[in-house]
Image (spheres, rainbow, N blue to C red):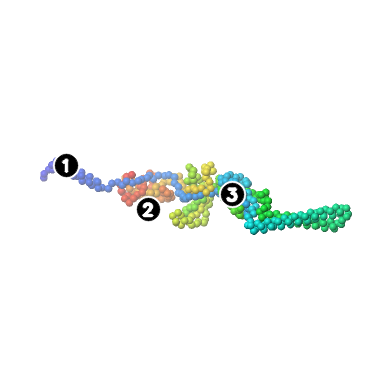
């Protein structure tokens, strides 16, 4: 057998190196993945919805009778004390008369003036006759019966004069020519509580009907938040539950406590045209007025109802979880390879899930695993 030459040996070795390189090049490489370490941290489960602030005890001030209200000199935001005057009410002004009605009213005035003149003349004569007979009676020149008849006649004449005066005043008032400028203010509406003016429905003077609202008043320091939540979320919200308020305009979150969960839901059409069952939840602000300076009634807030929370919870990113026939699983990186592990999950928030069993603190899990990630596949963090 002929011994290979040195040149042949070099060629064989070169061919083997090239073949090995080709084989290595076609072997699958490690998949680049995103990873995150399983760790313990504070965790909250929240229900988040937009809400609106309201004054807890607000009062709508209205006119108790039909009246003419004078111009309101207050402005929204003004501070008032309990019992402070708010509104001045006058008797309703007379209506404008058409020409025919005005002529009738003027004629009534003329007739009333003539009747009054006649009644005053009769009253003067009756009084003079009474006085004359009383003097004669004292001088024993008239009988007692004549004096009594004169007194009765004088009383009737004076009553007729007073009635004529009243008729003339009524005729003048009906025509709008009466002396109403010096008529006193009939009623002053005062503030029932100390607080701020929240709204004034109309500042100008005008006629108002009984019960017509004029302004709204309340204590701006006593605020509550009303939030409409989905009915499936409302069943998890209970009185006393903690609420965080964000996006109200301040730098720090405010705190509130749930005081009431309505028992009657209603249908609301969402912005996407979907019918939703919503329930109103009311929460009272716990943060002090100094912590929420500038927050008023009717302001928008983002309410976060804390359904559950703990300080130290072993948790995994929600993006690392995927469904299996038996529940949930994740891929853990061990010695550069992906290892599938079944896990038990507890509470879930938006980005994390509580790990009850299956993982330990410090495990490295693959987030967002795609179809290329399988048991035993080589991986390397990206």
**Pointer 3 or 1: first along the chain:** 1
Q: Residues within 10 Å of mark 3 (few under 14, many from 20)?
A: few
How far apart are the two marked residues, 3 and 1, measured between alpha carbons?
109 Å
In this view of the protein, which residue sits in the foreground, 284 or 127?
Answer: 127
**Pointer 1 or 2: first along the chain:** 1
- Residue contact at pointers 3 and 1, CB within 8 angstroms: no
- Residue contact at pointers 3 and 2, CB within 8 angstroms: no
Residue marked by disc 1: 10
- Secondary structure at badge 3 equals loop
Residue marked by disc 3: 204
Where in the figure is residue 97, as x and y percent of width and height?
63, 56
Where in the figure is residue 44, as x and y percent of width and height?
45, 47
Q: For the C terminus, give its image quadrant.
A: top left
Viewer can see residue 192 = no
- Mark 3 vs mark 1, foreground winner is 3
How far apart are the two marked residues, 3 and 2, measured between alpha carbons?
67 Å
Residue marked by disc 2: 323
Image-quadrant location for residue 112: bottom right
Image-quadrant location for residue 40: top left
Q: Is residue 237 left or right of residue 86?
A: left
């Amino acid at each position: 057998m002929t011994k290979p030459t040195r040149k042949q040996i070099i060629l064989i070795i070169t061919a083997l190196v090239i073949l090995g390189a080709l084989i290595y090049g076609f072997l699958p490489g490690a998949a680049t993945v995103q990873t995150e370490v399983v760790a313990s941290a504070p965790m909250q489960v929240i229900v988040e919805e937009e809400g609106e602030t309201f004054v807890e005890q607000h009062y709508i001030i209205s006119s108790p009778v039909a009246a003419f209200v004078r111009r309101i000199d207050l402005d929204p935001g003004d501070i008032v004390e309990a019992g402070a005057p708010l509104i001045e009410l006058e008797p309703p002004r007379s209506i404008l008369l058409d020409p025919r009605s005005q002529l009738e009213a003027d004629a009534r005035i003329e007739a009333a003036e003539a009747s009054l003149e006649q009644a005053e003349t009769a009253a003067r004569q009756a009084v003079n006759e009474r006085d004359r007979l009383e003097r004669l009676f004292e001088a024993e020149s008239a009988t007692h019966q004549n004096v009594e008849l004169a007194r009765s006649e004088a009383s009737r004449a004076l009553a007729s004069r007073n009635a004529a005066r009243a008729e003339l005043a009524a005729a003048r008032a009906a025509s709008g020519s009466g002396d109403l400028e010096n008529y006193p203010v009939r009623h002053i509406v005062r503030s029932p509580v100390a607080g701020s003016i929240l709204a004034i429905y109309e500042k100008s003077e005008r006629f108002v009907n009984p019960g017509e609202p004029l302004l709204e008043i309340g204590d701006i320091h006593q605020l509550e938040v009303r939030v409409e939540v989905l009915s499936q979320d409302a069943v998890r919200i209970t009185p006393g539950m903690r609420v965080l308020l964000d996006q109200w305009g301040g730098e720090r979150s405010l705190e509130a406590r749930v005081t009431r969960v309505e028992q009657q839901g209603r249908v609301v059409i969402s912005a996407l045209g979907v019918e939703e069952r919503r329930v109103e939840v009311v929460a009272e602000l716990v943060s002090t007025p100094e912590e929420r300076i500038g927050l008023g009634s009717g302001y928008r807030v983002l309410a976060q109802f804390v359904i559950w929370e703990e300080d130290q919870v072993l948790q995994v990113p929600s993006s690392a979880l995927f469904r299996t026939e038996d529940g949930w699983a994740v891929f853990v990186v061990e010695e550069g390879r992906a290892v599938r592990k079944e896990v038990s999950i507890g509470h879930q928030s938006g980005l994390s899930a509580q790990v009850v069993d299956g993982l330990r603190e410090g495990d490295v899990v693959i987030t967002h695993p795609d179809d290329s990630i399988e048991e035993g596949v080589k991986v390397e963090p990206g």
